[in-house]
Amino acid sequence: MLGYFLDSRKPHDLDIIPMTLFVAELFSATKCTVLQKFLKVLKPNFTRTLSVLEWGTVERRRLDILLEIQNHKNKVVAVLGIENKIGAGEQPYQVQAYQKAICSKFPSVPKAVVFLTPDAREPETGHSSTECPWIKCGYSTVIEFLRKLLPKAKGEIAVVVGSLLRFLDEQVMGTSKIQHDANALFEELYNDKVHRKAMILIRDLMPKSDVKLMYEGLIKDLRAKGQLKSLGNWKEQFLLNGRQPHATIWFVEEKDFSLGYMLHTRGSPVEIGKSATIRLMAWCETHSARRKLEKAFSKFDRGEYESAEWNKDKTKRFCPWFNIWTGNSYTLQDLSATDQKELKKLLISAVKETHARATKILKKL
């Protein structure tokens, strides 16, 4: 629906008003200076906006929404990409791939990629590009945009805007009656002196930990001690949000697939008591790449293999992840030094057990 309203060609009789309001609200929330260039070119009766859903890149990735701002001569004068993430993690190098693709397609106009999530989190795969920056955006910004759009809409369009506004506000952002009741109960407990002391004590006793910091320390230690020399020129990637949080060391990067060792935890957030499992994973850019790897690794010992986790899709759509091998698991204890030590053992053991065999298979491809 966002793409519908931001496209001035659609029959909502709002012209470029939605796009202007959205960019203005986004600038108000982020102060990203490139958005000022968008506002300068958005002129009534002079520009129009076009939205492309599932915009494809040469790498066969799909950006949720691509918005072109065109002048009266149909020349593109600015481009805004939107990637929406709700309850899902990022794909390897996903946001930076979109940034690169937009720069290649639209080299001489202002451009940016909006990373849209309920909590306005930063993308883990974005690149610090000044040519095409990423902009984090929360659903609260979209809600404020819809609130300002509502009085300008008429008839059935106003009904649709109002319905979308209520859905995002109540269902996605959790500001429903249940949430309001929970907030009221919290305030009541906190205002009681005895309960307040207990709540503060619980807060102070909660483990002070940072999952990303833990993994960064693990990688730093591995590099300092040169314990993964057999992998060659590897690089790390952390995708710690979404349904399948993981930290991956990529050691093979081909045009249509990549291979890496993944420390994977089921469900976000990553916390004490959850299990981290070591896996040898492939990321496939195409159907043919996946079929090629499935055939090559068909006789590979899969370890504690869990095909339903990664390799089966109930919708029978293409799944880019291929779980080649699954190793042991470890229950997280402190998200600090102890876990760093044990996770490093998992990783090193997995490399010793599988890397030579995997490399031999890859050489035959």
Image: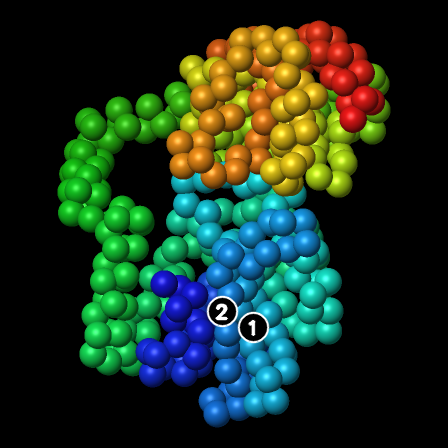
- In the rendered image, the quadrant that contains the N terminus is bottom left
Name the residue rendered at 61%, 74% in the picture: 78
- In the rendered image, the quadrant that contains the C terminus is top right
Name the residue rendered at 53%, 35% in the picture: 319
Q: Are marks 1 and 2 in contact (CB under 8 Å)?
A: yes
Residue 206 picture location, percent across and down = 40, 23
Label 1 SS: strand
Total numbered labels placed on residues in the image: 2
- Seen in the picture, residue 270 relative to 53 is either above or below; the reply is above
Label 2 SS: strand
Q: Which residue is mark 2?
A: 51
Task: Say left or right for 36 vs 197.
Answer: right
Mark 1 closeness class: few <14, some 14–19, many ≥20 residues within 10 Å: many
Name the residue rendered at 70%, 21% in the picture: 296
Q: Which mark is residue 99?
A: none
Name the residue rendered at 44%, 79% in the picture: 8
Which corner quadrant of the image does residue 70 belong to? bottom right
Q: Which residue is mark 1?
A: 68
